[in-house]
Image (tube, rainbow, N blue to C red):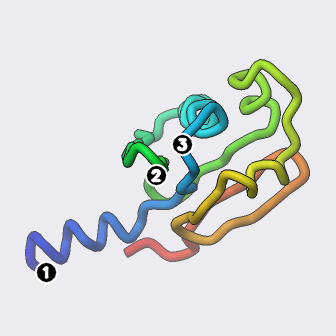
Amino acid sequence: MSVASSAQAYHNNMVGPVMRAGDLALAVIEAAKVDNPGKQVFVDDKRAYVRIHTEQEMILRRQTIEEELGRPFKMNDLEVDLSSFAGQIESLDDAVRFYFNKKL
């Protein structure tokens, strides 16, 4: 495997939301750091949108997002600012999980 294809394979293991820039995106960035201890959370700020990702799996909990926002929050409200995502997604009442079943 070449260096370029090795780097691409690593990139393919990244999961997480792509969100419209704003207060919710900032809260999700902080929640991703809190809810995924021991993982490096990458943030790619493109001004109009923000790509938030980590390797293999990312959990975002409603309670953590509420704490970061400083107000009540419903998980389905995430969809309003969620323009895309990487990986598979599992929506729960109090959390959302981005993941891959297989690792490249």
Residue 97 x %, y %:
69, 56
Front-most of residues 37 and 85:
85
Q: Secondary structure at mark 2?
A: strand
Neighbours of disc 3 within 10 Å: few (<14), some (14-19), many (20+): some
Q: Secondary structure at mark 3?
A: loop
Q: Is residue 12 left or right of residue 62?
A: left
Q: Residue type at mark 3?
A: Ala
Q: In the rendered image, is residue 12 in sight?
A: yes
2 and 1 marks in contact (CB < 8 Å) = no
Q: In the rendered image, is residue 35 in sight?
A: no
Q: Quadrant of the N terminus?
A: bottom left
Q: Which residue is mark 1?
A: 1
Res. 21 mark: 3
Residue 100 x %, y %:
55, 70
Residue plotted at (44% across, 41% down): 41
Front-most of residues 63 and 10:
63
Q: Secondary structure at mark 1?
A: loop
Residue reaching furthest to the front: 48
Residue plotted at (41% across, 43% down): 47
Front-most of residues 32 and 103:
32
Alpha-carbon distance for marks 3 and 1?
36 Å
Q: Is residue 25 left or right of residue 11?
A: right
Q: Residue type at mark 2?
A: Arg
Neighbours of disc 2 within 10 Å: few (<14), some (14-19), many (20+): many
Alpha-carbon distance for marks 2 and 1?
27 Å
Q: Nearer the viewer, mark 2 or mark 1?
A: 2
3 or 1: tag closer to the N-terminus: 1
In this picture, is 55 found above or below 9? above
